[in-house]
Image (cartoon, rainbow, N blue to C red):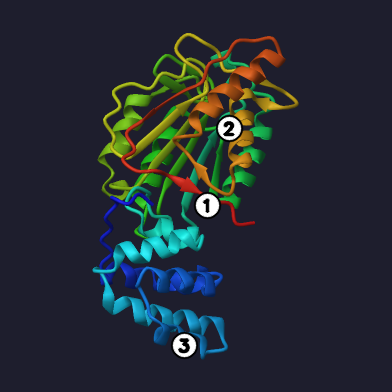
Amino acid sequence: MSAKQEYHISQEEFSRYRYDFVKYLNDIESFLDEALSNGLLNDEHRSVIMAHSNPDDQQRRLYSFIYPKLPYVSDKLMSALEKSNQELIYILFDPSIYPMKNKPHGRVILINNVKFDDGSKLQERYGSEKDVEGITELFKAFNFDVQLYSNKTAKEMRRIIEKASQESTAREDCFVMFLMSHGTAGNIVGTDGKELPYSTINTILRDSHQLKDKPKLLYINTCEATYVDVDVEDFYVTYATVAEMPSHRTDVRGSIFIKSLISVYKRHRNECDISSLSVKINAQVAEESKEISVDQVSSCYSTLKKKVILRATD
């Protein structure tokens, strides 16, 4: 923690996270060492806390000593949490990180178009089931519910996105969506061959009151994935490719982009900082492309105001 950092944790905010504080605090003696060292608590507090044999009772007593001191001891509390490696609790109160306090954190809306109408002359997207399997496994480990929608027309995709954005509740920390299909410049293509403009999706997300102030993560796995008119706050969108370039996929391994994304996120599953890992995903896509002798460049855009950090718990 920076020496200049100033935190302000109100009693109301601390109360909201009481359950998490009691549940996720580990190695209480290490925390108490730091709390005594910086003056957050004293020896008498420690004696009363450790007089309880049950760890939950110890943590509840600890909570009761800290609560009345807030917000004035916010910096000391954060310092003790950081130095005793209480990361799961620390990030709840860090104003530079979007809070991930609910289980599950939210939903992953996964739209995967594989088979297209004969009249559209679009090829079947063989291998995309590998992408679905990998995304589902990864985000379930990140404590999300995954909702799969297969083979949808342009109109059906729009309805799904509208409904999903309207159904988000206060118990959802984050909104995640994967769009996987054929694409044209500025559009995703439905199974009927018709286009759903990314600008329309942009408007749906921007105008959703339920998604206000929540991080919104969008992953687009289509050809010519160019997102336009981005004016959504707290928004992160990453594309499998760039304008006028294809997104490559194999029957056996799935798509280069999704395979790379999953690989990077899995390597950092204990602390998956979404924004900072974008560069690693781009590098992995380039490396995977060379292996099958193709060119593909992934990219991203962000209006996030804080860090989005996901952690696997399985």
What's the residue type where badge 1 is placed?
A: Phe
| Pointer 1 with pointer 3, Cβ within 8 A | no
Residue picked out by circle 2:
261
Mark nearer the N terminus (1 vs 3): 3
Disc assigned to residue 183: none
Question: Neighbour class for label 2 at 10 Å: few (<14), some, many (≥20)?
Answer: many
Residue 159 lies, in percent from the top left, at 40, 39
- At horizontal 47% and vertical 60% (from top left) the residue drawn is 83
Tell me which numbered mark, 1 or 2, is placed earlier along the sequence. Answer: 1
Q: Secondary structure at mark 1?
A: strand
**Which residue was labeled with disc 1?**
144
- Which residue appears at 35% of the width and 49% of the height? 2
In this rendering, is residue 157 above or below 282? below
Name the spot of residue 179 as percent of width and height, x first.
50, 31
Q: Disc 2, disc 3: CB below 8 Å?
A: no
Q: Is residue 139 visible?
A: yes
Foreground tag (2 vs 3)? 3
